[in-house]
Amino acid sequence: MRASVLRNQPCAPADRPVDDARVLRAVGGIMSASSSVDARFFGMLVERCVTEMGADGAWAHFHDEADSPVQTVFSTSCQVSGRGDLAAASAAVHALLRGGAALYLEKRSASLPQTPWFARFGAAACVAYPIGGGEGALAGHLALLFRARPGRAGPYIHALQALGAFARHALLVRPCRDREADGLREVVAQYEAVFQTAPVLVNVFGDDGKCLLWNEECERRFGWTMEEVNAHPEPLALFYPDPAVRAQVKASVGAEPSRLFREWHPLTRSGETLSTIWSNTRMPNGRVINIGLDITERKRAEADIVRLSRIDSLTGCWNRAEILDRLSQRLVWANRGGAGFTAMMLDLDHFKQVNDCHGHLGGDAALQHFCELLRACLRENDAMGRLGGEEFLVLLDEADARAGHAVFERLRFCLHAQPISLGGVPAVLTASAGIAVFGLGDATATDVLRRADQALYQAKHRGRDQAVVHQAGA
Ligand SMILES: Nc1nc2c(ncn2[C@@H]2O[C@H](COP(=O)(O)OP(=O)(O)OP(=O)(O)O)[C@@H](O)[C@H]2O)c(=O)[nH]1
């Protein structure tokens, strides 16, 4: 086998002309033939250096950081003798490449290593170029073998330089970049998972107004998917139909991330108005990141607490503090020239007897029954509150004494028509009332209450179950 190979080699190698275009084409072909750089790539590279570039043999030699050869890929044309010799040849060239520059070795000048393989191959010249390594990457060299000296080594050196740079990029730079990209993708995926599943409202809008991120909480609370939001010509209008409010929302977006949350009341798909607080930040690329909290439930609970703190728990009407507050507000309004009102103080007659006969629970039921009937006699804007015990205050808006009387008569009629059943026995409740129509002398709530109380006293004195209007000077 060895003899036949040697027999086929030219006995007196002559200079071989170099076809620059052919070399260039081969380089381009190798580079575009594979996107991944691995053993297969180098196998393809060395074969094409032989078949397309005009070399007689080629190899790619790699060593590790300790300078031990770890991998050599030879063109099939190099297989002229045992592998060990071949490895020794590539190692010998590698040893000469320490300077990091290209090498041109010739048999004629005795610069070609004296290892047996070169002789067996019939090598006249060798062009080698280092492939620089880097952290974690292989390093080594590419070599072309010629049985006839090439007319010029330059084109081959440049070809190996280009291929070496390509391989180095693929071995070192691309994996780094890929690793970085993988790391980045992982971070993005983590953030996205956090944004998507966070129990807070998170969304991102582009400077064209389109939604780019819409987390699960947004979808759950607003009822629209991101696609549905983006199907609207102006997505923000879905949540803020009022253009003036929209303008305020847009103007509130700051360039700096803000710890200050602003309260907004966006609409949901079902028409519910939410109470939300948002921190909105415009990024340098024009995107707006919005982080919000839905505080609708909290607001409702707070409102309930406030409301309950104003309500009399037994009867459900306003408590003393609230009804007096409302009286004061009406006074301020009326004294500023606003609409007047009439105050009516009501007191259940002989209520002590109800308690005495039917117990405290019976008395409570009587108070509730009385309030139910009284409430039914009032208009929406009127107010009724419990001053204490079995005493109540009613504020009748834009009402005079006649209107006050009419309300009382309605109540009286109802109380007689609808007796309460106490211990299985129907009992008719009656009440007395003192009516005080707002007058210019009423500066404070006490002024009004005093006059209503005087009239109530008269009603009791005159036999109960009636209303008396306070008369000035009475
Ligand atoms: N069941 C019940 N009784 C109450 C409540 N608050 C006050 N009372 C009772 O209401 C009764 C009021 O009695 P009085 O002030 O003597 O008045 P009255 O019996 O209605 O007599 P006149 O007002 O003069 O007609 C008392 O027995 C109080 O204990 C309450 O929340 N529940």
Image (cartoon, grey):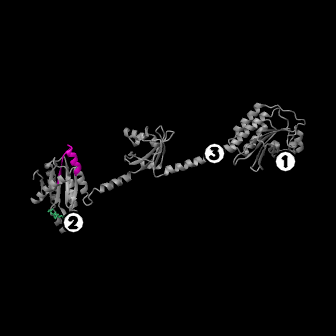
Q: Which residue is mark 3?
A: 178
Evaluate whether residue 91 shows in this view: yes
| SS category of the residue bearing label 1 | helix
Residue at 18% over, 46% down:
340
Q: Which of the two discs, 3 and 2, labels the residue nearer the N terminus?
A: 3
Mark 3 to mark 1: distance in Å?
Answer: 38 Å
The response on whether ligand 1 sits within 8 Å of label 2 is: yes
Residue 370 position by quadrant: bottom left
Check residue 362 in the rendering and tell me which mark sits there, or answer none.
2
Residue 97, given in percent of the width and then of the height, sits at 79, 42
What x and y, as percent, mark residue 330?
A: 22, 48
Q: Are marks 3 and 2 in contact (CB under 8 Å)?
A: no
At label 2, which amino acid type do we have? Gly
Q: Which residues make up the magenta segment?
A: 327-344
The front one of 300 and 333 is 333
- Up/down of 31 relative to 426, above or below: above
Q: Secondary structure at mark 3?
A: helix
Amino acid type, mark 3: Asp
Tag 1: amino acid = Asp
Q: CA distance from mark 1 to mark 2?
A: 116 Å
Q: Where residue 258 sits: x, y (%)?
A: 46, 46
**Which numbered disc, 1 or 2, marks the residue that appears first in the sequence?**
1
Disc 3 versus disc 2: nearer the observer: 3
Residue 394 magenta = no
Kind of element beneath mark 2: helix
